[in-house]
Amino acid sequence: MKVISFEGFEYSGKSTQIKLLKKYFIKNNIKSTFTREPGGNKDLEKIRNVILKSNFNNLSLIMFFFASRFTLISSIKKNDFIVFDRFFDSTYAYQKYNSKEKKLIISLIKLIDKNFIPKITFYLKLDKKNLIRRKDKRLYSNKFDKKYFGQFSRIQKNYEEISKIKIGERKFVAIDASLSANEVHDKIILNLKKCKLIK
């Protein structure tokens, strides 16, 4: 079982890249399971809706996300590939404000079954100028989008920070999300081949 995760700020094109990878896997007869966080199954999607509309404090959100994460992992059937739309990096990037929270999040990451630590994480990096341009084109946004939009620099810094933390043997790959969708997709496939995850 090979695990892949996708990370990035809202409007980075993450969902588009996941759809393109799914099409690639289907075309090449690669067995895979695609899931997302928070959510991922019928019961957890209900929790997702509660979280996205909530006013929970940050510590509560950390615990909610990891409770959901552990439940999701235990429910996933093994397949050739498991692809996560957000995983533990998102909790670190969005919920880490201080050293106490950093310590807690890292300790919870260490409790994840090592079989579910990604072989590779794709971080779609977008600068603020392009972020604003894409945001203005989107017709909708949820409460979390609005809450964290003004915290772009902190979240980006946290992504860069966790990219340098050794977590199992996973490779963290940052890709310029301002490139065209096809260019980003090509880079993703190239990296999967370089890591010998696909032929």
Image: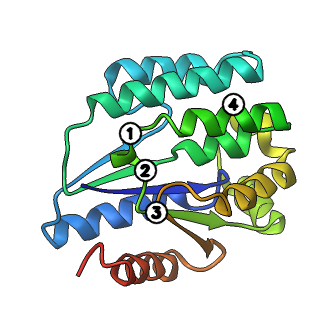
Q: Quadrant of residue 136?
A: bottom right
Residue type at numbered disc 3: Glu
Residues under numbered marks 3 and 2 in contact, where contact means CB atoms less than 8 Å apart: yes
Q: Which mark is residue 113?
A: 1
Q: Which mark is residue 104?
A: 4
The alpha-carbon separation of the residues under discs 1 and 4 comes to: 17 Å
Q: Position of residue 86 (x, y in %)?
A: 52, 46
The alpha-carbon separation of the residues under discs 3 and 1 comes to: 13 Å
Crowdedness near tag 4: few (<14), some (14–19) or many (≥20) residues, C-alpha within 10 Å: some
Q: Position of residue 190 (x, y in %)?
A: 40, 84
Residues under numbered marks 1 and 2 in contact, where contact means CB atoms less than 8 Å apart: yes
> Which secondary structure lies at badge 3?
loop
* Residue 144 in the image: above or below residue 126: above
- Which residue is under mark 2? 117
The alpha-carbon separation of the residues under discs 4 and 2 comes to: 18 Å
79 relative to 23 in the view: left or right: left
Counting residues from the start of the chain, the first of labels 3 and 4 encountered is: 4
Counting residues from the start of the chain, the first of labels 3 and 2 encountered is: 2
78 relative to 6 in the view: left or right: left
Q: Which mark is residue 174?
A: none
* Residue 146 in the image: above or below residue 47: below
